[in-house]
Image (cartoon, rainbow, N blue to C red):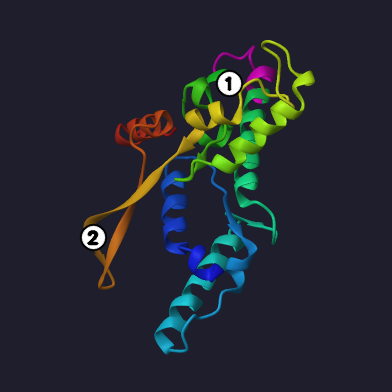
Amino acid sequence: SRYNKRQPNPHGIRLAIEYFLSRKCRVTAVVPTSWYRLRPRNKNEGDAKMVTDEVDELRSLREQGFLVACPPGDDDDAYSIALARREEDRQKHKATTTAHHEDDAMMDDDEDGGLIPESLLGGFVLSNDFFHDAVRREEQARKDHHQFYSAGGSSLSGRKSSLREWLKQCRISYSFANVGKIFQGQIEMEFLPNPRHPLIECIEAGHRFGSDL
């Protein structure tokens, strides 16, 4: 069933959101609209409670403004990538318009209150998906519209880098680890983003040494 193919993990989503919020990052999660209409797979009290808790958690996250619901039939990957790249465009525009202020050029939004390398300003996508379909679609578009390109020219989206190149720099993989925490009698998992990703290295360094990045 479709439910079995894409089972939501609201608690995992919240752990990821809380991780980045605690490190002064803005966070938006894209989820299929169908997740808000989940029903128990089995007619037993335990399963019904589990699904009810999942839906309640998703609705709570949405009410707090952390979720974007992908319309039925649309590609949620496309929404995730679009949001991240729009943030990248926004940060580039900000850096350009404030370049005459040396301090501003090295800072994220004013509310972040900390320094971060300009090379890491922008949007990132948190996913273990390699987005092969999205990459293939863009590469096919390049072939179909080759007359719009020239050496060193921009893509149809106005960006010089291809989606494949962008994902190599801006996709962050992740996992969850059992670190021995117990909460209400249950094992509490900890969110673990790729520790070798440049952004994670940067914000973890700031977190350890008390800087707000």
Residue 178 vs 129, above or below: the answer is below
Q: Quadrant of the C terminus?
A: top left
**Residue 43 in sight in this render:** yes
Residue 71 or 137: which is nearer the viewer?
137
Q: Which region shows up in magenta?
A: 94-104
Across and down, in percent, residue 44 comes to: 43, 89
73 left or right, relative to 63: right
Q: Earlier in the sequence, mark 1 or mark 2?
A: 1
Residue 173 or 3: which is nearer the viewer?
3
In the rendering, which numbered label is found on residue 181? 2
Query: Neighbour class for label 2 at 10 Å: few (<14), some, many (≥20)?
Result: few
- Mark 1 vs mark 2: in front: 2
Residue 25 vs 116, above or below: the answer is below
Q: Amino acid at mark 1?
A: Asp
Which residue is drawn at the image coordinates 50% and 64% (left, top)? 5
In the rendering, which numbered label is found on residue 104? 1
Q: Amino acid at mark 2?
A: Lys
Residue 81 vs 42, above or below: the answer is above
Which residue is drawn at the image coordinates 61% and 22% (left, top)? 161
127 left or right, relative to 89: left
Which residue is drawn at the image coordinates 43% and 77% (left, top)? 50
Residue furthest to the right in view is 147
